[in-house]
Image (spheres, grey):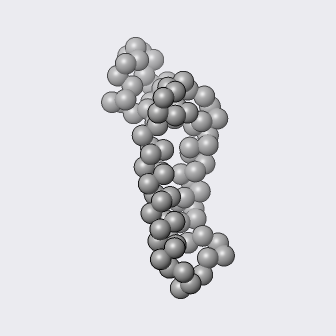
């Protein structure tokens, strides 16, 4: 539960926000290179790519800050929302 958000007040809005956040995180996970999504890389290079996040669905370039921001969002969700 987000800090400063009383559990009983405005529950419908909280549910909509939580649902929206979870949809955003689902999209974020589509930007992560998995074994299946890294098949176009040379086999010897795949271990360096798998797990990283790219900037957008149209930009497959890897940057450390994209991965850092994605992981920060996921950790913040786990720390703040998941009970």
Nearest to the observer: residue 9 or residue 76: 9
Q: Is residue 28 above or below residue 36?
A: below
Residue 52 visible? The answer is: no
Residue 62 at what x, y percent from top left?
55, 26
Nearest to the observer: residue 49 or residue 11: 11
Q: Is residue 44 above or below residue 5?
A: above
Q: How many marks?
A: 0
Q: Is residue 30 above or below residue 23?
A: above
Residue sitting at the far bottom: 8
Residue 31 at what x, y percent from top left?
46, 37
Please tell me which residue is depicted at 47% across the width and 33% down the height of the picture.
Answer: 57
Please tell me which residue is depicted at 56% across the width and 45% down the height of the picture.
Answer: 71
Q: Is residue 73 above or below residue 54?
A: below
Residue 30 at what x, y percent from top left?
42, 40
Please tell me which residue is depicted at 57% across the width and 62% down the height of the picture.
Answer: 79
Viewport quadrant of the N terminus: bottom right
Side (left or right) of 41 relative to 59: left
Residue 15 at what x, y percent from top left?
47, 71
Residue 83 visible? The answer is: yes
Side (left or right) of 21 relative to 35: right
Please tell me which residue is depicted at 37% across the width and 18% down the height of the picture.
Answer: 40
């Amino acid at each position: 539960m987000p800090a400063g958000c009383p559990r009983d007040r405005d529950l419908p809005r909280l549910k909509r926000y939580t649902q929206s956040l979870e949809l955003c995180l689902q999209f974020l996970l589509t930007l992560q290179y998995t074994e299946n999504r890294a098949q176009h890389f040379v086999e010897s290079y795949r271990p360096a790519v798998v797990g990283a996040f790219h900037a957008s669905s149209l930009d497959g370039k890897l940057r450390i800050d994209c991965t850092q921001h994605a992981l920060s969002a996921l950790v913040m969700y786990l720390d703040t929302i998941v009970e």
